[in-house]
C-alpha cells in the first residue's frame, strides 16, 4: 500500500497525476499531517545558529501557525470555489508531496555533507527544489480548484510568502 502511495505522490511531483487520483482517506490525511508536523518540529529543534535564540514555544507555535495557514487556506479556497468535497484529497496531496520534497532535500543535504564542502552546489539545488515545489503546489491547486495554472501559481506563491512572513514573525529568519 505504501509503495503505491509513494508512486502516486511521485507521479504528482512529476505532474502526471493530481489530487483526484489519491484515495479519499481521512486516516491517510491525519497520518501525513502527523508526519509533516513531526518532521517540521524535529527540523526546528536540530541545533543550528540561526534558530538557537528562538524560544522552543515560538518554534512550536510557528509550525502550528504555518500548518493552519497552509491547510486552512487551501480549505477556504476550496469552499470559496464550491469544491469542499475535494478537501481531503487536495490536502493529502499537498502533505504527501511536502514529505517527498523534504526527504529529497534531506538526502541531498546529507550527500553534500558527506562529500565535504559541497555547499557551493547546495544553494542552487535547494532553489531548484523550492521552485519545483511551487510548480507542484500550483499543479495541485489548478486541478483542485479548476482554475488556470497562472492563477494557481499565484496562489501557491502567496502561500509561500505567508510561510516566509510567519518565519519572520516568529524570528526564524530576518534580523
Image: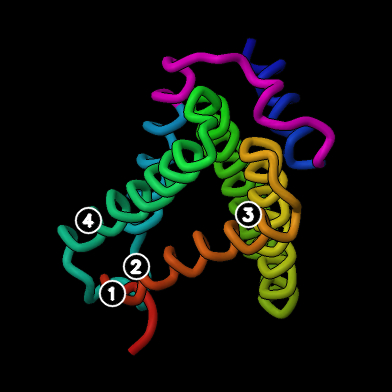
Horizontal and vertical percent position of residue 73: 42, 49
User: Marks 3 and 4, Cα distance to the nearest angstrom?
Assistant: 23 Å
Q: Residue at x 75, y 25 (%)?
A: 7
First of labels 3, 4 by sequence position: 4
Q: Nearer the viewer, mark 3 or mark 1?
A: 1
Along the line of sight, the residue nearer the viewer: 142 or 98: 142
Q: Nearer the viewer, mark 4 or mark 2?
A: 2
Q: Image quadrant for the C terminus?
A: bottom left
Along the line of sight, the residue nearer the viewer: 146 or 6: 146
Tag 3 and tag 4, C-beta contact below 8 Å: no
User: Marks 1 and 2, Cα distance to the nearest angstrom?
Assistant: 5 Å
How many neighbours does mark 3 have within 10 angstroms: few (below 14), some (14-19), or many (20 or more)? some
Q: Residue at x 67, y 74 (%)?
A: 123
Horizontal and vertical percent position of residue 118: 71, 73
Horizontal and vertical percent position of residue 117: 67, 76
The residue labelled by disc 3 is 105
Tag 1 and tag 2, C-beta contact below 8 Å: yes
Query: For residue 22, what is the image quadrant?
Result: top right
In terms of secondary structure, where does tag 1 sit?
helix
Q: Residue at x 72, y 32 (%)?
A: 18
In terms of secondary structure, where does tag 4 sit?
helix
User: Marks 3 and 1, Cα distance to the nearest angstrom?
Assistant: 24 Å
The residue labelled by disc 2 is 166
Q: Which residues are magenta?
A: 15-31
Could you tell whether 76 is left or right of 117 in the image?
left
Q: Which mark is residue 169?
A: 1
Q: Which mark is residue 61?
A: 4
Amino acid at each position: 500500500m505504501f509503495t503505491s502511495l509513494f508512486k502516486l505522490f511521485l507521479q504528482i511531483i512529476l505532474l502526471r497525476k493530481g489530487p483526484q487520483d489519491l484515495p479519499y482517506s481521512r486516516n491517510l490525511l491525519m497520518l501525513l499531517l502527523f508526519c509533516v508536523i513531526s518532521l517540521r518540529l524535529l527540523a526546528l529543534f536540530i541545533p543550528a545558529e540561526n534558530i538557537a535564540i528562538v524560544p522552543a514555544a515560538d518554534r512550536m507555535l510557528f509550525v502550528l501557525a504555518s500548518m493552519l495557514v497552509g491547510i486552512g487556506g487551501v480549505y477556504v479556497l476550496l469552499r470559496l470555489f464550491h469544491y469542499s468535497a475535494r478537501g481531503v484529497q487536495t490536502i493529502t496531496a499537498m502533505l504527501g508531496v511536502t514529505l517527498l520534497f523534504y526527504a529529497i532535500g534531506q538526502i541531498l543535504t546529507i550527500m553534500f555533507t558527506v562529500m565535504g564542502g559541497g555547499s557551493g552546489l547546495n544553494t542552487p539545488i535547494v532553489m531548484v527544489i523550492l521552485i519545483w515545489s511551487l510548480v507542484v503546489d500550483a499543479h495541485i491547486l489548478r486541478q483542485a480548484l479548476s482554475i488556470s495554472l497562472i492563477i494557481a501559481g499565484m496562489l501557491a506563491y502567496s502561500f509561500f510568502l505567508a510561510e516566509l512572513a510567519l518565519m519572520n514573525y516568529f524570528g526564524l529568519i530576518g534580523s
